[in-house]
Amino acid sequence: MAGELERLLQQGIDHLHTCDGEFNLPPWHADEVCREIIRRGGPIECAGTPYCSPAPFTPDWPGMRQAVAMGINFGVDSGDPKC
């Protein structure tokens, strides 16, 4: 994912809308992507934000602050507290 984002930025794309259902589900997915963005010199400098589930999420998520420059969108798929 980090390589694809990098190539888009090199082509002049400056606004990204990612349609990853929930970027932080599973949590290891977000960790791997953020680590790779940081390894490549992140954050990704463009307008755009990933969608994240409110849980599991913490404000000090390792790497999220260094990898995501614009912000994060939160959404829920259900109003059921058990989901």
Image (spheres, rainbow, N blue to C red):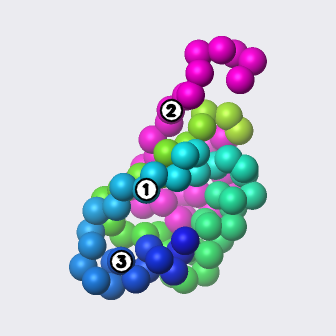
Estimate the x, y position of residue 16 in percent, counting from the top left. Answer: 34, 61
Residue 58 colored magenta? yes
Pointer 1 or 3: first along the chain: 3
Quarter of the picture holding the C terminus: top right
Pointer 2 or 3: first along the chain: 3
- Can residue 60 be seen here? no
Q: Which residues are magenta?
A: 57-83
The answer to whether 15 is drawn above or below residue 38 in the figure is above
Q: Which of the 4 quarters of the picture holds residue 38? A: bottom right
Please name the amino acid that badge 3 sits on. Answer: Leu
Residue drawn at (61%, 66%) of the image: 34
The answer to whether 66 is drawn above or below residue 26 in the figure is below
Q: Is residue 26 left or right of residue 59?
A: right
Please name the amino acid that badge 1 sits on. Answer: Thr
Residue drawn at (68%, 34%) of the image: 55
Label 2 and label 3: CA atoms lie apart by 26 Å
Q: Are marks 1 and 3 in contact (CB under 8 Å)?
A: no
Estimate the x, y position of residue 43 in percent, counting from the top left. Answer: 47, 70
Q: For mark 3, does the 10 Å Cα neighbourhood hold few (<14), some (14 to 19), or many (20 or more) residues? A: few
Q: Secondary structure at mark 2?
A: loop
Label 2 and label 1: CA atoms lie apart by 14 Å
Q: Secondary structure at mark 1?
A: loop
Q: Residue farthest to the top?
A: 80
Q: Find disc 2 in the rendering and name its residue.
A: 75
Q: Secondary structure at mark 3?
A: helix
Label 1 and label 3: CA atoms lie apart by 12 Å
Q: Find disc 3 in the rendering and name its residue.
A: 8
Q: Find disc 1 in the rendering and name its residue.
A: 18
Residue drawn at (65%, 58%) of the image: 30
